């Protein structure tokens, strides 16, 4: 590795906690602290704390902020009101995916875009390239902001002890600006685990204090730090996509099963709209499906999907699900194989292992 | 951590030799690197493998690791308990978490393996 890894403001805290640190998308990140399964289970049953400061934040301000981000993204920003956020994506004109992101509407002329760590440079260049005549200022604040996620059924109870806002009043995908023990923080009811929980954005300088404050506040409830390993198994159980695995610049947004975030009707023109509409009309050749492995073994990213002796697709994400205790995965298959109940095989190191298409999230919280 | 009675490979397997047979497993270091082990794939009894040949795999939630024969031999027994409790490889890698028992094909191959001391030094060097 020639380029130095980037560190979040919390890197030293992770080391103190005994985390196993690994390179991830150019960042020096904790993959696990005490153990992946223990951390995963804590989030499902109690609560877990994640450092997600590697994520990028781009602030777009100005008279045309809403119109500009509407032009860049597939979801409809004009539908958002102050204090509301949504999940969306940047597409290329051909409908392939540049990145998936959250858009927070801070005010009528201020939006915060939260993008993937590995895509920060690419996204910022893409955004800036399209400013043109839009009256906006684009500011990459990725290094100035720390992001900490508290996730799990006890997340609200724990965070409420140190947060003056009434958290029960914050609905899914809404947020508030508040002050946690004197630290100005944006708190949103969002996450990447399939559990209830919050994502807290504060100044990078305050990251360590917020992290330790949360850990101390929740310790007795069973809150533990959780690494990227658990984050990946949690998100996959909830069937949330990971950019770079499940979609990228070679996959069309409709193939990726993200049609639900694309607003084609009565919406402003956006980059990719024409092609997405055409694709919808023409129909798809393949689609991302979720599957459960029926035989023994774990399907992992890159393994071939085989049907009637032919390689027909590839696994894009796969793991052993700690909650369901079976192997699950996502992969692209021809349209004929996308119906729930369809059986195909995954080639796991020269063995063909049976897998079955399943609908919806693998895990859904009660 | 690493018993002086055993021999070790650079692929992070340990061997406990008893006459013309040897018990083989993965080392504490290997299981620690893998994390929570959820699945162990072992060969059939009576199958023969040469030194360096892959004989199975050990999978954790996050990764899969192939396991290689530290010396050549014939499988005389596999640890069937691991089918139901693969976590034994994490909990007791040098004991209950053993993988296979082999009949040694060529005793001279044992000379290629490392002592506990040499293995520990190798791990230290590798993780630098």
Image: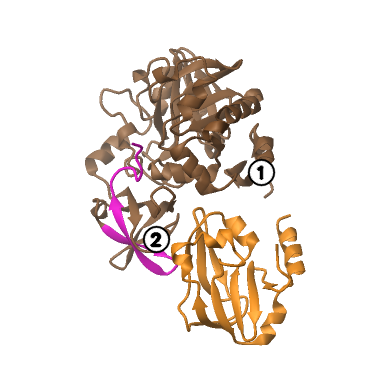
Chain colours: A brown, B orange
**For residue B96, side relative to residue A247 (left or right):** right
Number of residues whose C-alpha sits closer than 10 Å to that of mark 2, classed few (under 14), some (14–19) or many (20 or more): many
Image quarter hosting the C terminus of chain A: top left
Residue at the spot x=45%, y=78% of the render? B44
Residue A242 in sight in this render: no
Provide the residue designation for mark 1: A18
Residue at the spot x=38%, y=45% of the render? A251
Front residue of B34/A121: it is B34
Residue A93 percent location from the top left of the image: 38, 36
- The reply to whether the magenta stretch includes residue A73 is no
Residue A61 in sight in this render: yes
The chain holding disc 1 is: A
Residues indicated by labels 1 and 2 sit on the same polypeptide chain: yes
| Tag in front: 1 or 2 | 1
Q: Under tag 1, what secondary structure?
A: loop
Provide the residue designation for mark 2: A304
Residue A103: image tag: none
| Vertical arrangement, residue A187 with respect to residue A351, above or below | above
Q: Under tag 2, what secondary structure?
A: strand
Q: Residue A26, located in which quarter of the rendered image?
A: top right
| Vertical arrangement, residue B73 with respect to residue A108, above or below | below
Q: Residue A344, located in which quarter of the rendered image?
A: bottom left
Mark 1 / mark 2, whichever is N-terminal: 1
The chain holding disc 2 is: A
Residue B90 percent location from the top left of the image: 57, 59
Front residue of A219/A78: it is A219
Residue at the spot x=58%, y=23% of the render? A202
Residue A22 percent location from the top left of the image: 62, 47
Residue A351 percent location from the top left of the image: 40, 69
- Provide the residue span drawn in magenta: A343-366
Number of residues whose C-alpha sits closer than 10 Å to that of mark 1, classed few (under 14), some (14–19) or many (20 or more): few
């Amino acid at each position: 590795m020639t380029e130095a890894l980037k560190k979040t403001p919390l890197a030293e805290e992770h080391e103190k906690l005994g985390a196993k640190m690994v390179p991830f998308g150019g960042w020096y990140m904790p993959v696990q602290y005490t153990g992946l399964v223990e951390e995963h289970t804590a989030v499902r049953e109690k609560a877990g704390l994640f450092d997600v400061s590697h994520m990028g934040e781009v602030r777009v301000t100005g008279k045309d902020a809403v119109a500009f981000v509407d032009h860049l993204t597939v979801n409809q920003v004009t539908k958002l009101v102050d204090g509301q956020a949504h999940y969306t994506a940047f597409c290329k004109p051909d409908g392939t995916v540049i990145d998936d992101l959250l858009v927070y509407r801070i005010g009528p002329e201020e939006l915060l875009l939260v993008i993937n760590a590995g895509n920060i440079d690419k996204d910022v260049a893409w955004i800036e390239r399209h400013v043109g005549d839009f009256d906006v200022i684009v500011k990459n604040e990725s290094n100035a902001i720390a992001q900490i996620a508290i996730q799990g059924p006890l997340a609200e109870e724990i965070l409420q002890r140190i947060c003056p806002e009434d958290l029960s009043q914050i609905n899914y995908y809404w947020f508030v600006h508040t002050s946690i023990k004197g630290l100005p923080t944006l708190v949103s009811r969002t996450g990447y685990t399939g559990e209830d929980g919050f994502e807290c954005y504060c100044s990078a300088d305050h990251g360590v204090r917020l992290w330790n404050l949360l850990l101390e506040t929740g310790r007795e409830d069973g809150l533990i730090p959780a690494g990227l390993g658990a984050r990946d198994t949690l998100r996959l159980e909830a069937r949330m996509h990971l950019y770079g695995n499940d979609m990228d610049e070679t996959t069309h947004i409709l193939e990726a099963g993200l049609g639900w975030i694309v607003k084609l009707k009565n919406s402003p023109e956006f980059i990719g709209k024409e092609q997405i509409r055409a694709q919808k009309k023409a129909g798809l050749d393949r689609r991302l499906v979720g599957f459960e492995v029926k035989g023994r073994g774990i399907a992992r990213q890159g393994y071939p999907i085989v049907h009637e002796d032919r390689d027909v697709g590839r696994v894009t994400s796969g793991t052993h699900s700690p909650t369901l205790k079976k192997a699950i995965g996502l992969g692209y298959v021809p349209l004929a194989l996308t119906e729930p109940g369809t059986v195909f095989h995954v080639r796991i190191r020269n063995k063909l292992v049976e897998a079955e298409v399943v609908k919806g999230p693998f895990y859904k919280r009660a | 951590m690493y018993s002086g009675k055993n021999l070790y490979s650079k692929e992070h397997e340990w061997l406990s030799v008893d006459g013309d047979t040897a018990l083989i497993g993965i080392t504490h270091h290997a299981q620690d690197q893998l994390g929570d082990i959820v699945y162990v794939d072992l060969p059939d009894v009576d199958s023969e493998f040469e030194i360096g040949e892959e004989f199975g795999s050990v999978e954790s939630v996050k990764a899969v690791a192939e396991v290689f024969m530290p010396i050549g031999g014939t499988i005389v027994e596999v640890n069937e308990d691991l089918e139901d409790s693969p976590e034994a490889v994490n909990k007791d890698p040098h004991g209950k978490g053993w993988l296979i028992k082999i009949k040694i094909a060529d005793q001279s191959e044992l000379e290629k393996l490392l002592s506990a001391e040499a293995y520990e030094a190798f791990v230290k060097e590798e993780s630098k």
